[in-house]
Image (cartoon, helix red, strand yellow):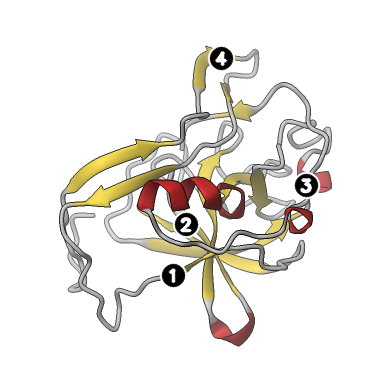
Amino acid sequence: MDKPEGCEQEIAIKKVYLHPEWDIVSKNTSNGVKISSSHDIALLQLSKPVHFTSKVKSMCLDNGQKFDAGKICYIAGWGTQTLKGPPTRILHEAALPLVSHEQCNDPLSYSGAVSADMICAGYKQGGVDTCEGDSGGPLMCQGEGGRWFLTGVASFGHTGCGVPNKYGVYTRVVNHLRWISKVTGMNIPQPRQQDIPLITVGQQQYAWDR
């Protein structure tokens, strides 16, 4: 973050809106990870508008795009590249595939802890992942016509980064469009309920704050 690339903009945050149903319990489980709730999402109201340029552009909110498991999407952030490592000096990005809820809830992964409000991405063998300091960063997927959609918001993962079978878990944006619309006052088209997959989930949700 201390290495200018020529397209940065520094804008103060005017107000932070946390989702009213979000909560994080600072209780560690036996394997050293936190228990987190769903709705891990917030909105930031800026003190002034963003100046859009050829390198600074807006992105569509995912309103129910049909992105299947295996779809290659992108993550970005200034977080560490190794657990407890230093933050990066420049913005990094990485490509990784979406993972089905069934695979992410496998006993070798999160054992039913991933709810319908979440979406997973990463490689079974690990190696590419969000890490500490990447919380709130985007999971971006390109849809038909070349448009980019904000599909997820970096939320949590297993202790360590890029661990095999421990995918990155992201808050699903489409499930929170009604709340986003209410807070911002924007008229955001809502997806049909049948377009949002629902799954049976377990009670524990393993997390460390990214």
Residue pointed to by mark 2: 138
Mark 3, Cα crowd under 10 Å, few <14 / some 14-19 / many 20+, is: many
Tell me the amino acid under the disc marked 3: His
Mark nearer the N terminus (4 vs 2) = 4
User: In the visual, does 142 lie left or right of 70?
Assistant: left
Q: Nearer the viewer, residue 165 or 101?
A: 101
Q: How far is mark 4 from mark 2, CA to CA?
A: 26 Å
Residue 198 in the image: x percent, y percent? 79, 44
Which residue is at a point 20% across and 64% down the rendered structure image? 49
Mark nearer the N terminus (3 vs 2) = 3
Mark nearer the N terminus (4 vs 1) = 4
Tell me the amino acid under the disc marked 1: Met
Residue pointed to by mark 1: 59
User: In the visual, does 42 lie left or right of 112?
Assistant: left
Q: Secondary structure at mark 1?
A: loop
Pair 4/1: label in front: 1
Q: Nearer the viewer, residue 91 or 8?
A: 8
Question: Is 203 drawn above or below residue 109 in the view shown?
Answer: above
Pair 2/1: label in front: 1
Q: How far is mark 2 from mark 1, CA to CA?
A: 10 Å
Residue pointed to by mark 4: 28
Tell me the amino acid under the disc marked 2: Pro
